[in-house]
Image (spheres, coloured by chain):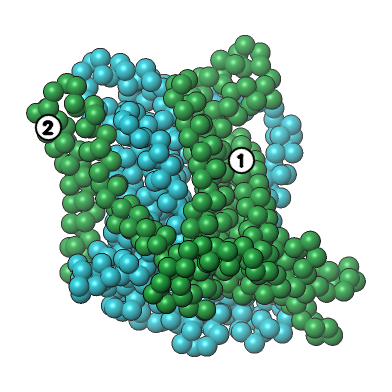
Amino acid sequence: MDPRLGTAIVVVVGVPAVLIGYIWLTEQLLRAFGQRIRPKLRPWLWLAPALAFLGVFLVYPTLGTIVRSFENKAGTSFIGLDNYAWFFTNDASLIALRNSLIWLVALTAFTVGVGLLIALLVDRVRYETVAKSVIFVPLAISMVAASVIWSFMYFYVTPPEPQVGTLNAILEVFGIEPVAWLQVTDYAFNTILLVVVMAWMWTGFAMVILSAALKGINPELLEAARVDGASERQVFRGITLPLLAPTIAVVTTTMIITALKAFDIVYVMTSGNFDTQVVAFQMIKQLYDFGQPGRASAIAVILLLAIIPVMAINIRRFRAQEAIR
Amino acid sequence: MTSAPVAATASRTRTRRGPGFLGRLPIHLVIVFLMLVWLIPTIGLLVNSLRPPDEVTKSGWWTVLFNPSQLTLDNYKFVLAQDSITSGFINSLFISIPATIIPIMVAAFAAYAFAWMSFPGRDVLFILVVGLLVVPLQSTFIPILQLYGPKGFNIAGSFLAVWLAHTGYGLPFAIFLLRNFMGDLPREVFESAAIDGASPVTAFFRLALPMTVPAIAALAIFQFLFVWNDLLVALIYLGAQNPDNAPLTIVVSNLVSSLGGGWQYLAAAAFVTMAVPLIVFLGLQRYFVRGIVGGSVKG
């Protein structure tokens, strides 16, 4: 028997046991304190494991990133805001900013919109699991395999060679000239085509989470409304949609962040050529290709700052949720 | 928590299906259309993974329809014949299962605190936690590698290193999602539990957790999927130091790069690899049933 199997069993059984034991122990510990202190201390004990992990793996490195963003290439001296000034004044990053904005809007709107539509529709049919699996499959395929798939879709060969790419073959059937899809820069068309790949993958994500929320709605509420004579449309607008709203907000926020962080598709499919670069891609390029950790760090900090407004909206929403529950 | 309300809701859901098959034809058409759109790219890859590589560059995958004799299992035979595939498969399971369970539990405690306990600075802390979602993982590798290195905890290359890292990286989304679902639970449930003398620990395990089962199932699907398909984190914390512990993703990428090109093996490997997340997805479907939450609220 593989000795690692023992380790795995210890971890799978042991870690949950330790965590449950921890929470149970904190409650015993809290008994030592007075009624007034207990509720003040308790949240921190419940948060402690999460904060420890986050502190080590995300906060500590991020503090380093922030410091590094004010330093020069070699990290030997402080150069103030030069790295930030550089980012906002060169043509490549301005195109990257524009493209990231396109990614953010198009990817989020598509995945949340279509994901919601599918979650609602399949809820009404018997082959729900099959339909959901089909939409989920692209996410289970690795990013690299997805890129291979879509390279076949967009593939272009200089005529008169036969077109082996799916889209160009379809054009050929209608007698239209083949198109070098990923090189069409008009209206950032090629960026939209890259977003399509990501949207194809991530719609399943939105669908699964929205579907989970949909199943969480108390059916008696819907039934009561129907008994009172509400039409299906009224039930949807008056009950289902408001109850789904918090989850739609969570999925939207997550997709915005996913869009901002996306770089692999760009990396594999166009290497950022033909004006398809995005902000996260510029970061990776500065870090690994150009050996500019200072500039890469500045881009990472810009991404962090970019989502503050999104998070502020989330907090307002959570306050509203607490006011009515 | 009786089963009666659940059963009652189930039968009611069935009766409300409303108009017959023809009346709901538009729904079926839309769903089938979307399924086809989503399937076509995958079918393209599946077909090409079953063709010899030189055929793929010469003709489109749809030519199989007229000439099915070109289909071959050679790519799959080659991939499955690699010794490293089996060990990679087992390593992937070793990595993915704990790296799914640990963050979900840790996140559930934190989400409960964020949703149902009040403390100063809660909103700011929550913004910070979820804001960490946007941190590019690449910017964390160097400091964490130093912590993992011989001068630190000396765990680089071990499964523990990857479990811990995936827990840290997975927490922001897990906390965000679970806090949303837990925060949506009705206040009366917790108030009446508190009046009955239930401690927050009891309320958490008996009420909050069971009532968030669909969300936890969704989270488990994604955390498992992300860890299973992860190449980057595994490569940084495992791959270089300890090839014996390499997961499937590393094995496959080595296979492809060592053969130069070799995307046809990648395509075959992609279908072999995705089987497991798909099984997890299907296995957890039974938790996506209408009425689970409503039923336990009543109980």
What amino acid is labelled 2 in the image? Gln
Res A33 → quadrant: top left
Mark 2 or 1, which is nearer the eye? 2
| Residue A28: mark | 2
What amino acid is labelled 1 in the image? Leu
Q: Which chain is cyan?
A: B
Counting from the top left corner in percent of width and height, residue A134 is at 58, 54
Query: To which residue does mark 1 refer?
Result: A116
Query: Residues at marks 2 and 1, common chain?
Result: yes
Q: Residue at x 54, y 84 (%)?
A: B262
Counting from the top left corner in percent of width and height, residue A64 is at 37, 62
Classify mark 2: residues with Cα within 10 Å, few (<14), some (14-19) or many (20+).
few
Counting from the top left corner in percent of width and height, residue B202 is at 23, 28
Q: Residue at x 35, y 38 (%)?
A: B111
Residue A29 falls left or right of residue A114: left
- Name the foreground residue: B10 vs B182: B182
Res B128 → quadrant: top left
Q: Colour of chain A?
A: green
Q: Residue at x 23, y 15 (%)?
A: B196
Would residue B48 be seen by someone viewing this image from the given angle? yes
